[in-house]
Image (tube, rainbow, N blue to C red):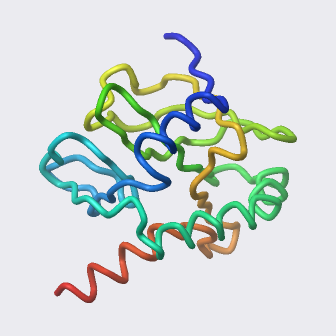
Amino acid sequence: MPNLKLGFPAIFAALTLCGTLNGCSKPAGPGGGQQGEMIKPAAAPAGFTRADDSDPELIAAKISAQNGLSEFKAAFAKKETGQKFAVKAPFREGVNEEHKWVIVDAVRKDETDGHIERPSAVIKHLKVGQIITVNDYNIEDWAYTDAKGEQHGGFSVAVLRKREGQSK
């Protein structure tokens, strides 16, 4: 399986053509999306909804995630057995764009290495288990649960949960 490295050209193209953030999924279900994954396909598949490129709450969530990356990396450095850490990054293929969670395997000064844990809804070149390197400036969200069971990060997930509560 090839190693995929997300660099400035990939994110620049995504931001230039598609805006900062595009669409958000519902919690995992029959349609397959993982909670908080974002997607911009030509037509959203079952289980996914779309959000506007200029959505102020999701843009604010990304800014919060970027501002808190040092907390995330410090917590990862003290990772205990069984803890799972993840970052969200954009992936693009043709007119489709999906913002997926990547399970973190290692962090460095300016990059995070991880792997794809769940199948992509629209990006066919992404495969489960595929190794991914994400530059820090491409990270749109991050999440982990600490040793006490408290959740940290998940800024975009909080926005989506709030909206789901409002729509019910």
Image quarter in which the C terminus is found:
bottom left
The residue that appears at 31% across and 80% down in the rendered structure is 163
- Position of 8 with respect to 121 (left or right) is right
Q: Residue at x 29, y 32 (%)?
A: 95
Residue 112 falls in which quadrant of the image? top right
Residue at image point 62% right, 23% down: 5
Between 121 and 27, which is closer to the camera in this rendering? 121
Q: Which percent across, then down, holds residue 53?
A: 39, 59
Q: Is residue 13 left or right of residue 18?
A: right
**How many numbered discs?**
0
Residue 58 image offset from top left, x and y in percent: 47, 68
| Position of 155 relative to 130 (above/below) | below
Furthest toward the top, the residue is 1
Residue drawn at x 40%, y 45% is: 18
Location of residue 155 in the rendering, given as x and y in whole percent from the top left corner: 54, 70
In the displayed orientation, state which residue is furthest to the front: 16
Q: Which picture quadrant has residue 117?
A: top left
Image vertical order of residue 85 relative to residue 65, above or below: above
Is 164 on the left-hand or right-hand side of 84? left
Instruction: In the rendered view, tell whether residue 146 sits above or below residue 102.
Output: below
Q: Nearer the viewer, residue 127 or 90?
A: 90
Percent position of residue 64, x then y: 65, 70
